[in-house]
């Protein structure tokens, strides 16, 4: 069905049609298009354009179109310009000339905004539900090893000992912020644009608040030109998706490293790893590598829409049809990655002793020692120097923290009082970090309890 043509002497060239048609991807919006069109029919009826009978005929026909669209064969051979034209064509086949009234005063510019908003609102909910599953998987993984100690890193150099649950709770915080961001994207999306016309506002007396109620929108848009020109809501979703992908990518990078032979801390489940076609011994972390790889793809989608929108004159321009493929792809990728990451987390086996030994044999306790000296009255700068010399001496003579004791420490520097020696054990220093947000064991246990409550109460 062509929604225009009277002004033209010849039809579009085959090349232009092939080049510009979007049905092969925007058919994904058919459910939204039908729901929106049914609400528009009801609004036209309230506005006196359609009779109650006509409205019922149209709404029923749309119901049958929606049911038929579940079968991909429904689209076979269709040459329509886009999903909006396709749906009206199908309506025409079912209700005849009456179909010519459904588009009264309506523009595809507002229709495409409505359809994408309806679709994206559900995608936001989907992404948020998957985030909750992932956060749950992280808390479960933390609870499996509540007392495990690992070296925390800066510059990928062993820095200070932390509890395994404390490390996982760092990602919990990131995903909690992502949950908020998807919620914010949903709020910006959940605004009803119909009644805007092509750009100047509808010429028919729609009750726009009633359309919003009909389609369960929280608000209505306030400027018809803004509606035709705006894709901010899509950018908001793509930004939320991109930040979530960065978090997923960093988690993947961590676990690719931690499960390597070089680190050897953890085993990923057979179900989320792959073998090599040549090297029989390989067990590769492909699931995590794909998440890391797909993060680039989602960031690319955000940038794609940024560049599409930059510099477009108000209001609608056909360039904006290029919003959909990146948006659809980003939603598929982020949702797929969230699901995959939760599955990987469920499969992780931590070999507790390995990261503990990594902490124990390195000088991650150095800060604990320096702080103890400072608590005993030594100026922190001097304490830092003394412990720095202790580390230098140990590195030279191949000593680990465990090779020192109260006597040898006191002999090294009189500032080392006997009570300081217990801090050579990485588990001990953590007990001095019972500060809100710190890795103190009691603090982390409480943070885990709070995290479970927060997750249960996320809205
Ligand atoms: N398919 C178009 C899009 O996705 C919507 C149609 C509006 N087209 C137009 N020429 N005004 O943006």
Image (cartoon, helix red, strand yellow):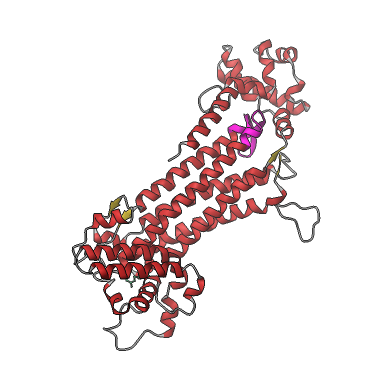
Residue 62 vs residue 379, the one in the foreground: 62
In the picture, residue 17 is in which quadrant? bottom left
Residue 90 visible in the picture = yes
Q: Which residues are magenta?
A: 141-166
Query: Seen from this angle, which residue lies furthest right?
Result: 280
Q: Is residue 421 left or right of residue 171?
A: right
| Residue 141 versus residue 9 in the image, above or below | above
Where's ligand 1: which quadrant? bottom left
Q: What residue do we see at 73% from left, 36% from top? A: 351
As for residue 148 lying within the magenta part, the answer is yes
Q: What residue do we see at 44% from left, 67% from top? A: 67
Residue 417 vs residue 240, the one in the foreground: 240
Looking at the picture, how far across and down is residue 339, in whole percent? 57, 50
In the picture, residue 445 is in which quadrant? top right
Q: Is residue 392 left or right of residue 305?
A: right
Which quarter of the rendering shows the C terminus?
A: top left
As for residue 22 lying within the magenta part, the answer is no
Looking at the picture, how far across and down is residue 267, in whole percent? 72, 43
Residue 313 visible in the picture = no
Looking at the picture, how far across and down is residue 44, in whole percent? 24, 66
């Amino acid at each position: 069905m062509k929604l225009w043509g009277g002004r033209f002497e010849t039809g579009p060239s085959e090349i232009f049609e092939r080049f510009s048609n979007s049905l092969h991807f925007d058919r994904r919006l058919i459910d939204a298009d039908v729901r929106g069109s049914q609400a528009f029919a009801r609004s036209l009826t309230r506005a006196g354009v359609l009779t109650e009978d006509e409205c019922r005929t149209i709404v029923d026909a749309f119901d049958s179109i929606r049911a038929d669209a579940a079968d991909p064969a429904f689209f076979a051979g269709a040459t329509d310009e886009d999903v909006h034209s396709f749906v009206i064509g199908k309506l025409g086949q079912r209700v005849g000339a009456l179909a010519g009234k459904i588009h009264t005063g309506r523009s595809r510019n507002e229709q495409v905004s409505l359809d994408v908003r309806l679709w994206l609102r559900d995608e936001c909910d989907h992404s948020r539900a998957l985030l909750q599953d992932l956060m749950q998987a992280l808390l479960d993984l933390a609870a499996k090893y509540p007392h495990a100690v690992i070296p925390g890193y800066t510059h990928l150099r062993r820095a200070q000992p932390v509890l395994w649950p404390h490390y996982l709770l760092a990602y919990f915080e990131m995903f909690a912020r992502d949950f908020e961001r998807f919620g914010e994207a949903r709020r910006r999306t959940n605004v009803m644009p119909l009644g805007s016309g092509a750009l100047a506002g509808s010429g028919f007396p729609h009750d726009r608040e009633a359309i919003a109620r009909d389609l369960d929108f929280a608000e209505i848009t306030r400027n018809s030109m803004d509606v035709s020109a705006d894709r901010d809501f899509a950018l908001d979703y793509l930004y939320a998706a991109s930040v979530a992908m960065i978090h997923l990518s960093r988690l993947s990078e961590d676990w690719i490293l931690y499960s390597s032979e070089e680190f050897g801390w953890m085993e990923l489940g057979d179900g989320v790893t792959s073998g090599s076609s040549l090297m029989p011994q390989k067990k590769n972390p492909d699931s995590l590598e794909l998440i890391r790889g797909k993060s680039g793809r989602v960031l690319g989608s955000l940038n794609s829409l940024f560049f599409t929108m930059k510099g477009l004159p108000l209001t609608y321009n056909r360039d904006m049809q290029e919003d959909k493929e990146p948006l659809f792809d980003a939603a598929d990728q982020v949702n797929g990655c969230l699901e995959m990451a939760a599955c990987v987390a469920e499969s992780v086996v931590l070999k507790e002793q390995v990261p503990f030994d990594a902490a124990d044999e390195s000088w991650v306790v150095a800060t604990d020692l320096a702080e103890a000296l400072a608590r005993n009255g030594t100026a922190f700068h001097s304490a830092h120097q003394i412990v720095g010399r202790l580390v230098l001496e140990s590195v030279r003579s191949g000593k680990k923290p465990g090779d020192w004791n109260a006597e040898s420490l006191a002999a090294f520097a009189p500032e080392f009082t006997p009570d300081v020696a217990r801090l050579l054990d990485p588990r001990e220093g953590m007990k001095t970090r019972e500060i809100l947000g710190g890795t103190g064991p009691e603090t982390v246990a409480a943070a885990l309890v709070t995290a479970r409550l927060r997750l249960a109460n996320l809205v």
